[in-house]
Image (cartoon, grey):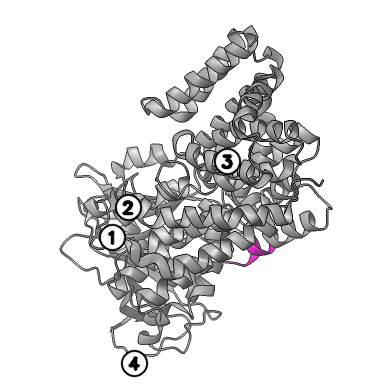
Amino acid sequence: MTLHEGLAFGLVAATIGGFLSGRVPYDLVALAALVVGVAIGIVPADQAFSGFSSEVVIIIASALVVSAAVARSGIVEAAMRPIVPRLRTTRVQVPVLVGFVMLLSMVTKNVGALAIFIPVALQLARRTKTPPSALLMPMAFASMLGGLVTLVGTSSNILTAKVRLDVEGKAFGMFAYTPVGLSVAFIGFVFLAFGWPLLPRGRRAASTMEAAFNLEDYTAEAGVPETSPACGRTIAEIEAMAEGDVQVALVIRERFRRYPRRPDWTVRAGDVLLLRGEPSDLERLVARARFELAGGGHGEARVVEGVVTADSSLVGTTLARAQLEQRFGIGVLAVSRSGERIRQLLASVRVRAGDVVVLRSASPRMPETLGELRVLPLAERSITLGRNDRSFIPALVLLAAMTLVALHLASVGIAFFGAAIVLLLMRVMTMHEAYETVEWHVLILLGALIPISRAIHDTGGTNLIAGLLLHSVHHLPGIGVLGVVLVVTMVATPFLHNAPTVLIMGPIAASLAVKLGFNPDPFLIAVALGAGCDFLTPLGHQCTTLVMGPGGYRFGDYGRLGAPLSLLVVVAGLPLIALFWPLHGH
């Protein structure tokens, strides 16, 4: 072992120790390791930041933006709307949700696909009295399995493609993972559809800050334009468009005539409706019925929820006299008042201390304005009311990007980066929302680790480890060696996270394959499969972490459903890899 190899291994060991300790964030550990790598001379100074310019970082960031745009478009809810009323039992709910999540994870980043469906699952669980714990973990596992199918489905596939580029000079294509990934995903779907009863019963979701607010329903004012599908429908039919989660409290016709709620009352164009419900439910109805929300406006804007404090200048005045739109460019979308239901136009509401308001503004001075008005922002909740424009544009842009890649007219990075730019230019989401969508800690982690991974290869470290492994596995058949790589990767992922596991195991697996006279491609596919399938813990992948709180899961719960699924992946994955990626062929 040379000095540089020893330093490289020491740095990797220290980095892994930092990951395992959990005392310092993963991304900060990686950044510190990069600095140390430059200081001790194993990472050339002129290549220290090459990881941040890697196409991998661009693909992941772009995929996150595109996934978020698809989520905001409402196309998923539109597709689910005819099906949801029929999902009355857990036996039906699990396979349907698992199937939808899995399919969407094949074309968008799996974490984004899962995030789209979690609110749908929680809403369904609330209506049918189904424990969320019976739905969320199968959905998380389904998103990970779906992500195995294409290059952009998961970070593991994207990073494995980069490792192949470094080793063989050519990256895996968009659909290189599809034969193995689709087969494994189908087997996983069948297991999850019938195996969900293995999960423990009686788990309750962790309490959230949103529950702590305990607010009364909001009241919003919505106009009915001639183009609205609500024209000519009864109040009961309009409320059914929101699955009963929004109540029409009052109908105002010809500006001054007020009609109390009657289920059989027919709504006309020009009517103004006072709607009562939670912001997410109000937003869903406004989008579906194409209502014009009072204070909504057009173009890019931020939406903030805030409490009117006792010393606010708004207290005692009506919203009309406050002239928030004229003075500050702020529109009031909805108002919530504890202990009282609002039954008048929002402009006529006299503000009281303690009122909670949803405000919309395109002004960059909105934070300063809130301070001037003594309105305290509630930063813990994400409010979408008045912010989402529902359309099929994101789905069409995503389809166009996938088509360009499939026809080899553009690389994955260019296609998805271009798709993200097109969506931003079309104002599908604001720049502020796009920045919030990107998981910066993941990009920083990858940008810092890529030069370190390259340094291990350049110093000969991967060949050294492969040589040591060679003595342990040389007596095994090729399929056995492939199995060792797959299992070791699956075991390492919970401790290192999926991205660092690929960057460390990928070069080692490829080097081992070459030394044994095998094609390195099936070994790289095994690394991608193993790193994308951490079903045993909530640590190795964002998808399993995301559902832990809402599902109320304990650490040990993952193994009850995840252990047999992991065994299935190994048993089915090995022959599938060998079938589609011959060990002795290129």
The residue to which callout 1 is attached is 200
Sequence-first disc among 1 and 4: 1
Q: Amino acid at mark 3?
A: Val
Q: Is residue 392 magenta?
A: yes
* Residues at marks 2 and 4, CA–CA distance in whole angstroms: 48 Å
Is 101 displayed left or right of 164 in the figure?
left
- Camera-nearest label, 4 or 3: 3
* Residues at marks 2 and 3, CA–CA distance in whole angstroms: 26 Å
The residue to which callout 4 is attached is 264
Whether tag 1 and tag 4 are in contact, CB under 8 A, the answer is: no
Q: Which residue sits at x=56%, y=68%?
A: 75
Q: Which residues are magenta?
A: 390-396
Classify mark 1: helix, strand or loop.
loop
Relative depth, front residue between 216 and 334: 216
Q: Is residue 421 above or below residue 190?
A: above
Whether tag 2 and tag 3 are in contact, CB under 8 A, the answer is: no
Label 3 neighbour load within 10 Å: few <14, some 14-19, many 20+: some
The residue to which callout 3 is attached is 484
Sequence-first disc among 3 and 1: 1
The residue to which callout 2 is attached is 557
| Percent position of residue 236, x then y | 35, 86
* Residues at marks 2 and 1, CA–CA distance in whole angstroms: 7 Å
Classify mark 2: helix, strand or loop.
helix
Q: Is residue 546 visible?
A: yes
Whether tag 2 and tag 1 are in contact, CB under 8 A, the answer is: yes
Q: Is residue 580 magenta?
A: no
Whether tag 4 and tag 3 are in contact, CB under 8 A, the answer is: no
